[in-house]
Image (cartoon, rainbow, N blue to C red):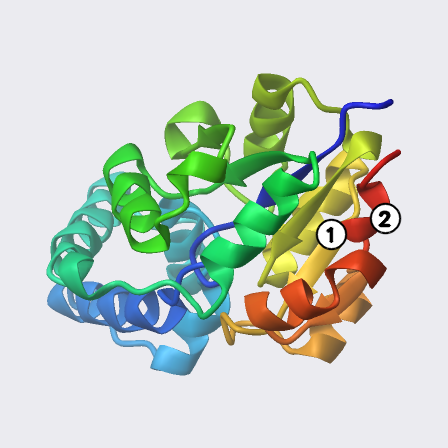
C-alpha cells in the first residue's frame, strides 16, 4: 500500500483567522503611514508576511519599512492569540483523516510561535504527524517551498498527497509542485469560482462540509491506495 497523506493549510482553513489577519495587517500599514482598503489587504491574506506586504505596497518598498510593517502586524496579532478559534469540525476532520490511515501534515506559512497558537486552538495534536512553519521555507506561498518541505518531512510525494487550503495562493503553490489542491471557502479570501479557476480539484464550504463528504472527496480517494 502506498504511503499517502493530506497536507492542511491552517490560517483560514482549519482556524478562523483570515479576517483577524486582514484587520491586523490594515492597522499595521496605517501605523507606518500606509493606507489601503481592508478588502485589498484581505485578498492578499494567505501569502507569507513579507510577500503580502510587497503585494499590497509594491516590490520596491524599502526593507526597513517592510520590516516595520511585519513587526507591527506581529504585535497586533498577538493581542488576538487568546481569542483564536478553530472552525467547527476542524479537529474532527483532522482526526478522521488520521483514523483512515492518512499521514496528517500541517503546512503553515505562520511562524513557529503563531503555529503553536494555531495548534492550541485546533486541539488535534494527537492526530498530527508533521507540522512545518515559515521557518522551513525560503519563500512563502504562492511559491511551493513550504509544501516541498512538508512533503519531504512527511516522506510523501506530490502524487501521494493532497493539500487543503482556502486561498488561490494555495492552489498556485500546489500547481507549481504538481499536487492536487482541495479548496475551502471559509477563509473568505477566495470564492468557489476563483478557487476552481485557479485549478482546485474541488471546493467545499468549510471543514464541516469536507468532513461530511470525506469519502467522496479527493482526500477520501487517497484512502486505501
Packing grade of label 1 (10 A; few <14, some 14-19, many >=20) is many
Residue shown at the point (42%, 81%) measured from the top left: 39
- The location of residue 137, given as percent across then percent down, is 48, 27
Disc nearer the start of the sequence (1/2): 1
Disc 1 to disc 2: CB gap under 8 Å? no
- Mark 2 Cα-neighbour bin, 10 Å: few <14, some 14–19, many ≥20: few
**Which of the pair 138/121 is nearer the observer?**
121
- The dot on residue 221 is 2
* Front one among 196 and 91: 91
Location of residue 68 with respect to 168 vertically, above or below: above
Residue assigned mark 1:
181
Measure how far apart labels 1 and 2 are at the Cα level. Answer: 13 Å
Does 221 sit left or right of 168 as displayed?
Answer: right
Q: Residue 209 falls in which quadrant of the image?
A: bottom right
The residue drawn where x is 59% and y is 62% is 167
- Residue shown at the point (58%, 63%) measured from the top left: 166
- 66, 139: nearer the viewer: 139
In the rendered image, residue 124, in percent from the top left (x then y), is placed at 41, 45
Tell me the residue at 38%/63% (across/down).
86
Q: Is residue 63 left or right of residue 91?
A: left
Amino acid at each position: 500500500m502506498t504511503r499517502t497523506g493530506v497536507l492542511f493549510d491552517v490560517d483560514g482553513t482549519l482556524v478562523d483567522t483570515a479576517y483577524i489577519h486582514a484587520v491586523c495587517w490594515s492597522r499595521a500599514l496605517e501605523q507606518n503611514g500606509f493606507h489601503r482598503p481592508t478588502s485589498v489587504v484581505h485578498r492578499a491574506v494567505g501569502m507569507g508576511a513579507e510577500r503580502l506586504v510587497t503585494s499590497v505596497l509594491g516590490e520596491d518598498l524599502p526593507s526597513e519599512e517592510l520590516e516595520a510593517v511585519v513587526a507591527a502586524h506581529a504585535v497586533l496579532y498577538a493581542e488576538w492569540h487568546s481569542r483564536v478559534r478553530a472552525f467547527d469540525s476542524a479537529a474532527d476532520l483532522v482526526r478522521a483523516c488520521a483514523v483512515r490511515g492518512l499521514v496528517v501534515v500541517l503546512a503553515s506559512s505562520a511562524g513557529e510561535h503563531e503555529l503553536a497558537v494555531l495548534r492550541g486552538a485546533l486541539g488535534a495534536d494527537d492526530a498530527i504527524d508533521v507540522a512545518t512553519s515559515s521557518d522551513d521555507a525560503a519563500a512563502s506561498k504562492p511559491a511551493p517551498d513550504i509544501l516541498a518541505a512538508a512533503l519531504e518531512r512527511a516522506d510523501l510525494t506530490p502524487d501521494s498527497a493532497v493539500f487543503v487550503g482556502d486561498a488561490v495562493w494555495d492552489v498556485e503553490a500546489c500547481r507549481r509542485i504538481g499536487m492536487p489542491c482541495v479548496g475551502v471557502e471559509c477563509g473568505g479570501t477566495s470564492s468557489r469560482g476563483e478557487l476552481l479557476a485557479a485549478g482546485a480539484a474541488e471546493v467545499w464550504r468549510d471543514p464541516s462540509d469536507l468532513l461530511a463528504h470525506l469519502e467522496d472527496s479527493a482526500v477520501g480517494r487517497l484512502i486505501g491506495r
